[in-house]
Every structure is written in C-alpha cells, then in structure tokens.
Amino acid sequence: MADRIYLDWNATTPLRPEARQAMLAAMDLLGNPSSVHAEGRKARRLMEEAREVIARGLGTVARRVVLTSGGTEANVLALSPGLKAPAGPAERLLVSATEHASVLAGGRFAPSAVQTIPVDSSGVVDLCGLDTLLAGGPPALVSVMSANNETGVLQPISEVAEIVRRGGGLLHVDAIQAFGKIHLDINGIGADLVTLSGHKIGGPKGVGALVLGAGVDDVIPLLRGGGQERGRRAGTENVIGIAGFGAAAGAALAALETEHLRVSALRNRLEAGLRQTENVTVFSAQAARLPNTTLFTAPGLKAETAVIGFDLEGIAVSSGSACSSGKVQPSHVLEAMGVSPSAAQGAVRLSLGWSTTDAEVDRCLQAWRKLSLTLLKGRDETALERF
C-alpha cells in the first residue's frame, strides 16, 4: 500500500525535526523554571530563548509574550472585559462572523455584550459594518482573525485596525493560522493582542501564546495563584512544549518566503485540477488567501462521504474546522458568507504544508477524479461501497 498523504495541515501539522530535537533536549533538564538554582536557571534560559524567537516572529520583544496551553486559552485570556481601550475600559466585544469557536464564545464577556460583525460573500469582514457597530455603543474590544481556518481568507487587518483605533477600541487578532505562513508584525498591522498556537506551525500540541501590543500594558489573568508569566498566567510553564514551539517558530519563519511561493504554486495546481471536474466551486477564490488552503465543493457532494472516500484512498482531508469535526452541522463560516446549506454540506478542505509534494498533489487529484465519478454520479450514502 502506498504511503498515506496528509492534507489536513490547518487542523494540525507534523512535528518538525527541529521541534522534536529541542523537546528531547528539554526532557533532560531537571529544574523548575521558577527555581533560582542552576538547574532552574537552565530551564528558564531554554524557555526564554523560545519566547524570544516567538517575539521576533511578530516584531516585538519577549516580555510581551504570554505563554499558554494553546490557542483557545490565549483567545479567552485576550477576550476580557475591562481592558483599557483609548476610549475607556472595554465594555463589549465585537467579533467577525467567521471567527474560531473559541472567539465566537465570547471569552469572559457576557453573551449580551457580544456583537457580530458581518462578512461578505468571500468571508471578508464588512468594514462599514464594523464602523457602524463601533459608533453605536460604549468602548469595545474587536476580534478579527488574520486568516480563516476553513477558507484561508486573509482579513484586511491594517484597515480593521484603523477603524478600531478611530472608534476608540482595542483590536485582538487570532493569528493562529497565519503565523509562520505569511509575514506578520504586531505593530505594523496595528493589533493590540495577537494569539498563536504551536501545533499549527510544526510544534507540539498544548502550547500557545498571547502577544501584547504596545497599547496594552497587561491582561487580566485567567489562572491565578502564582507569579509565572509576569503575573499574567499562574502555573508551572510547559518547558518541553515551549522549547518545541520556539524551535518550530524559528524553522517556519526562516523558510517563510520560499515556502510561501512553493506552496502557493502547489495550491494553484491543485485547484486547477479540481476545476477539471464540472461545477466544482472553490470558496473565496477571488479573495486574498493563505497559500496552503483550498475549500471546495460540487453539486451533490456530501463532505462526510467525501472525507471517508479520501481516507480510503490513503489521503487525510477535512470537512472544515478540526474543532467541529464529527458534528453534523453546517459550517458557520459558510453560513455567514451566505452559502446555501446544500452547498455548505459538501465543503471539503485541503490544506498543504512544508512536506507536501507535487506527487502528493497528483495522487490527491487522481483520488478526487475516482471519487467524483461515484459520489457525484451516485449521490447516495452507499456510494462508498463501490470502492
């Protein structure tokens, strides 16, 4: 049997060799990073070196990086009422309609204090709608992701930041899908808070970060009871995971420009091949997108059946966000874009990465041609029995 092909990089990525090596080295360290003896200082040094790499990747300094257990914790830590905005403490939260579930949940804001910013048919945030919402109430924290995890759409963050600043608010950017794939500078894009996750760039699962912009002096801790992370998050830090996160960030950032070009070319080739099947739609194709992400459908396609079909062909793909996989419900991203339920139920996501090859794209297209002949012709739940 041929080796399996992994095309679900937006869900999680393989562990980079650099991250594995860094984590193995960290496993040999004995000390608690809060201890002042030599063993503790070695652990602290390793952790701070990783923090510095992550900070440089966003054009900031290490003291502004708060290390967390992952992207969801970082998002919830950021979404706190009472953060000091230019117009006063944030009393409400404005979130784009296509945000990750951990942002749509509102963090620590009461549900009544959360409002939704609409998006257009490509999933790009409605800037006029944002402006109107900001003008219609007390100071706000605004959360708009840099890149969507399902469609790959890139939001006009600098323009969003300008509107937020004019409205006296603060801007949180979930950059979990974008970091390591496109150039980001926290001050250049005008963000006040940025969240990251290690396992989206080749680091381990279970580690992330909240990065504070120049306009934010501090955050309100979720976890209290210790002085770790400059008092912003209590609890002994995950030194092994942090070491892997830092190493993965360094490797991803070093190869960012060359990989952007290479993976973009692979994605374009993949999409050209998909479009050879009649009536295939690539969502958000006219918008700026991540170089690695394709979300597509075809009339009569059912995503659950297609994902199983690809899996039987030895190819791992997704029907959307990994955080909602296995749940029979329409994509809230496509719903916000105005996509019909029948089209949304057939959406399949292919996401590429640093080890994806031309040969793997060819095998994916070959599998799709085989699947499409059955799934789009038969259009029934027993289609997979024919393989």
Image: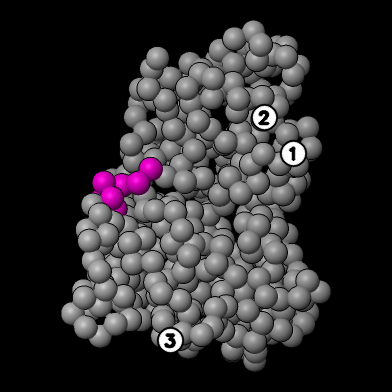
Residue at image point 68% right, 49% down: 333
Residues 317 and 335: in front is: 317
Identity, as a three-letter code, of the amino acid under mark 3: Gly
Q: How many marks?
A: 3
Toward which corner of the image does residue 87 lie, by quadrant?
bottom right
- In the image, residue 179 lies in the stretch drawn in magenta: no
How many other residues sit within 10 Å of disc 2, few (<14), some (14-19) or many (≥20)?
some
Callouts 1 and 3 close, C-beta under 8 Å: no
Quadrant containing the C terminus in the rendered view: top right
Identity, as a three-letter code, of the amino acid under mark 2: Glu
Tell me the tag on residue 227. 3
Question: x, y percentage for residue 247?
Answer: 28, 58
Residue at image point 71% right, 76% down: 109
Vertical comparison of 326 with 209: above or below: above
Q: Which residue is mark 1?
A: 328
Vertical comparison of 305 with 319: above or below: above
Q: Earlier in the sequence, mark 3 or mark 2?
A: 3
Helix, strand or loop for disc 3: loop
Question: x, y percentage for residue 335?
Answer: 75, 46
Toward which corner of the image does residue 97 lie, by quadrant?
bottom right
Helix, strand or loop for disc 1: loop
Give the residue at the far front of this rendering.
30
How many other residues sit within 10 Å of disc 3, few (<14), some (14-19) or many (≥20)?
few
Q: Is residue 266 left or right of residue 220?
A: left
Q: Which residue is mark 2?
A: 304
Identity, as a three-letter code, of the amino acid under mark 1: Val
What stretch of residues is rendered in magenta?
Answer: 14-20
Residue 116 in sight in this render: yes
Q: Earlier in the sequence, mark 1 or mark 3?
A: 3
Tell me the tag on residue 345. none
